[in-house]
Amino acid sequence: MKKADLAVGFFHAPARGRPRAVARRAGMGYTGAAGRRGETMARDEQITRCSICGREPVGEDYPRRVCPRCDALALNDAGRPPLVAPDGSAGDNPVFIEGRQCWREYARGGWATMLDADNCRDYREFCRRNGLPDPP
């Protein structure tokens, strides 16, 4: 393989290791599971992962975010799947995932589930401790 061939590189997450290795040898970044096609990722860049399982990448827009896979395991305080309005704008709080208390911020179209590491008594206290705006 010529040095010029290495400069071509592959920037999407490959199915097999060869393109990834070629990109590394050329000194280029590649996107793993957390990146988007066409973006590069620095090796020292930190990825925020699920607060429950630690595997799935999640956004950084909420503190201690929970991935959709773990969120599907949520139960309300009665031990049943949480009730959610048809448009996703309201629902049960708190929820429990693997026995750990979590809070949901509901908005039209969905919600964000966050782990409560401080064991707050209500959502308002959780928001204050984690720098979120007070709920209405």
Image: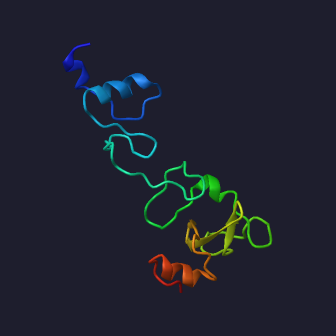
In terms of image quadrants, where is residue 38? top left
Q: Residue 23: x percent and y percent? A: 31, 29
Task: Judge whether 99 appears above or below 15 on screen.
Answer: below
Q: Residue 78: x percent and y percent? A: 80, 72
Task: Judge whether 77 appears above or below 35 on screen.
Answer: below
Q: Is residue 85 visible?
A: no
Residue at far bottom of view: 136
In terms of image quadrants, where is residue 116? bottom right
Task: Count up the numbered dots.
Answer: 0
- Say whether residue 40 is left or right of residue 113: left
Q: Closer to the camera, 112 or 17?
A: 17
Which residue corresponds to the image point at 27% horizontal and 34% vertical from the top-left?
28
Q: Residue 50: x percent and y percent? A: 54, 56
Residue at far top of view: 1
Which residue corresponds to the image point at 55% horizontal and 48% vertical from the top-left?
55
Q: Is residue 21 visible?
A: yes
Q: Residue 32: x percent and y percent? A: 42, 40
Which residue corresponds to the image point at 72% horizontal and 70% vertical from the top-left?
83
**How does the figure colour the protein chain or chains?**
rainbow
- Say whether residue 17 is left or right of residue 106: left
Residue at far front of view: 118
Q: Quadrant of the N terminus?
A: top left
- Say whether residue 135 is left or right of residue 74: left
